[in-house]
Image (cartoon, helix red, strand yellow):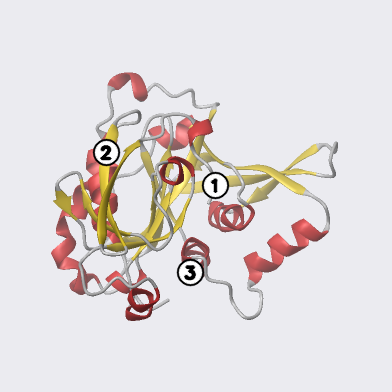
């Protein structure tokens, strides 16, 4: 992954408001039991403008709240590769871990970010040994657990305390060609020249759907479609898609306009409000 360059992203200044918008959830959505675990999903990776550190955004499904988790550069690259669907020619660390897990017949029941103390997040991998084996709780950095979860389609959960104590920050996405966002069952990336030629997209502004599942798939959106509008607002980068959908409350509906074979189509997607509505990609 190339080094993040904030100066190249000033045109996306509106996305800096994303986290503040997502924190303005109704009062009844903020009463989390600190001991409970809540279903969540990874939205994207980027950078904290103030500290310059990589950060992954994890969204609590039922409340719509987003938790920023600061991670290392190598872990950010591992998460970004998984979101982009990139398979390295030789297995990297998390790819190897996933392969060993499959080969050993073990299963990760879930990964959890269960605590935050003095700004440090604590995670665990809940490993099930064999079909009827006991559940083992293995200590893990959240960054490693999240990178592994993406490779194994493992459920992700956040403790109520982690959601409640999410810190304020200013989010800056990577440069356009490296952006990847997962929302509403879609993984969206910036369409490179190679992808434009592959899917016959021409030079029209929009973002490419690289993978799809859940509600988006049910509504007919396919990999290779070019998203051009959210509601009545045009989109040209994955970061803008995140900005336009991030403030939508769970249970609401949004119209997604996309192009396939030079023809515009519109699908109305419902923002998931419970774990069963979210299908791993």
Q: Cβ–Cβ below 8 Å for labels 2 and 1?
A: no
Residue 110 placement, left or right of 262? right
Give neighbour class at mark 2: few <14, some 14-19, many 20+ (Cα, 10 Å): some
Q: Is residue 209 above or below residue 200?
A: above
Disc number placed over residue 254 in the picture, else none: 2
- Number of the label disc, if any, that sits on residue 77: 3
Q: Residue at x 45, y 46 (%)?
A: 217
Residue 86 versus residue 18: which sits nearer the camera? 86
Q: Quadrant of the N terminus?
A: bottom left
Relative placement, left or right, of 3 versus 102 is left
- Asked if disc 3 and disc 2 are in contact, CB closer than 8 Å, the reply is no
Distance in Å between CA atoms under marks 2 and 1: 21 Å
Earlier in the chain: of badge 2 and badge 1, it is: 2
Between label 3 and label 2, give the one nearer the viewer: 2
- How far apart, in angstroms, are the residues tagged by discs 3 and 2? 31 Å
Q: Quadrant of residue 62?
A: top left
Residue at figure coordinates x 52%, y 71% from the top left: 86
Could one spot residue 170 in this view of the protein?
no
Position in image of residue 21 (x %, y %): 22, 40
Residue 280 vertical position relative to residue 158 in the rendered view, above or below: below
Task: Describe the element under mark 1 as helix, strand or loop.
Answer: loop
For the point 45% across and 41% down, which residue is it?
Answer: 218
């Amino acid at each position: 992954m190339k080094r993040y360059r904030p100066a190249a992203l000033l045109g996306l200044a509106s996305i800096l408001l994303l986290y503040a918008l997502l924190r303005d959830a109704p009062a009844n959505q903020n009463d989390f039991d600190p001991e409970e675990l809540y279903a969540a999903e990874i939205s994207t990776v980027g950078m904290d403008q103030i500290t310059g550190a990589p950060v992954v955004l994890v969204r609590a499904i039922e409340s719509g709240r987003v938790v920023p988790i600061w991670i290392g550069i190598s872990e950010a690259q591992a998460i970004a590769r998984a979101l982009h669907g990139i398979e390295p020619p030789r297995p990297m660390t998390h790819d190897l871990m996933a392969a060993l897990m499959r080969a050993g017949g073990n299963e990760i029941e879930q990964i959890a970010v269960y605590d935050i103390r003095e700004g440090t997040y604590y995670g665990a991998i809940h490993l099930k040994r064999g079909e009827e084996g006991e559940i083992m709780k293995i200590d893990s950095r959240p960054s490693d657990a999240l990178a592994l979860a993406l490779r194994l389609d493992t459920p992700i959960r956040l403790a109520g305390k982690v959601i409640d104590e999410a810190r304020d920050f200013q989010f800056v996405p990577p440069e356009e060609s490296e952006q990847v966002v997962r929302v509403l069952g879609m993984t969206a990336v910036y369409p490179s020249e190679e992808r434009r030629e592959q899917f016959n997209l021409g030079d029209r502004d929009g973002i490419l759907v690289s993978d799809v599942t859940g509600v988006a798939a049910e509504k007919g959106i396919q990999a290779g479609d070019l998203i051009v509008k959210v509601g009545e607002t045009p989109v040209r980068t994955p970061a803008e898609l995140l900005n336009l959908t991030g403030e939508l409350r769970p249970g609401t509906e949004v119209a997604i306009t996309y192009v396939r074979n030079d023809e515009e189509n519109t699908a109305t997607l419902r923002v998931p409000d419970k774990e069963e509505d979210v299908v791993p990609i």
